[in-house]
Amino acid sequence: MASHKQPAPFYFGGLAASFATVCTHPLDLVKVRLQTQDTKGRGMARTLLYIGRHEGLLALFNGLSASILRQATYSTVRFGTYDYLKHKFSREDEVKTPIYKMLLAASIAVGGGFGNPADIVNVRMQNDGQLPAARRRNYKHALDGLLRISREEGVLTLFRGLGPNMNRAVLMTCSQLASYDFIKQYLVSTPYFDEAATTTHFAASVLAGVFATTVCSPVDVIKTRIMNSSRDGRYRGAIDALVQTVRHEGSMALFKGWLPSFSRLGPHTIITFMVLEKLTNAYWARRDRRD
């Protein structure tokens, strides 16, 4: 993210991530569908076409309100806290922020708990179309989903999968935010990249997206399966879900949906960081002119 002696406004990360979510939501929906399949499915492209053909093009945006609500909570907290702590841990005379300080800030900047309720609704709304009609929840929007889950299954259901989600949040923040800053810092140290250049932001965000997808895939699969289960679901917890998945489907099932995950997380990471860089640079340019 743009370098400056002070952190950018707290909400910039959530704003950038919400914009990216609108652009990449259909790919996130396909990822959820693939991760909740018990058997080998159609694959990314065929699933995308199948949904559009049998459920309608608008079905590709099922759960969008929940996705935006999740980013407005989860990403706002993790981006804002990470940026604040990164600056807090850095010394004024440091030309480069050490990677261990980035990882420390990322590990503390946990936003998963804040986004968990919206994430539950998001996963269910995205997966609804492949369920039999009698088992569909048919939430109208994110708030309707939150209210119905609380009323029908209990408020605690909104925090189902909190453990895997918190673990994923730590992994995601470390592998996405800290890696982006580290990669960008390295690129800028070479004679080929400039800190404010769009090409620098693009290259760093692509590599950060690949790294984050691979690191987070196992936790993401387990989290998605737990969140999609009902009160009498098949899993007793994260460990049980992990054991059952590996036992019945093999260890590679933990990377099920990797391609759609990257196809979603890659563009999402690129858009998020490029928008965030533009917002931050514009903010500080305005502040510097005013001062």
Image (spheres, rainbow, N blue to C red):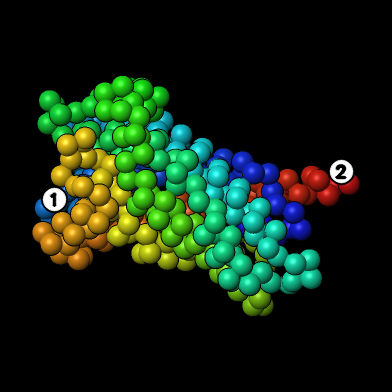
- Write down the quadrant of residue 258 in the picture: bottom left
117 w.r.t. 289: above or below = above
Q: How many marks?
A: 2
Q: Secondary structure at mark 2?
A: helix
Q: Amino acid at mark 2?
A: Arg
- The answer to whether one can see residue 96 in this image is yes
Residue assigned mark 2: 290
Identify the residue at horizontal 36%, vertical 23% (top origin).
147
Q: Which residue is mark 1?
A: 38
Q: At label 1, which amino acid type do we have? A: Asp
| Front-lying residue, 165 or 173 | 165
**Residue appearing at x 34%, y 34% in the figure:** 156
Asked if 97 appears above or below 136 in the picture, the reply is below
Q: Secondary structure at mark 1?
A: loop
- Residue 217 spot, x, y in % from top left: 32, 59
Q: Would you say 113 lies left or right of 79 here?
A: left
Q: Nearer the viewer, residue 260 or 110?
A: 110
Mark closer to the observer (1, 2)? 1
Task: Kindly tell me whether residue 267 is visible in this rendering.
Answer: no
Q: Position of residue 116 (x, y in %)?
A: 40, 40
Residue in the image at 61% along x and 67% along y: 101
Label 1 Cα crowd, 10 Å radius (few <14 / some 14-19 / many 20+): few
What residue is at 64 percent from the left and 44 percent from the top?
10
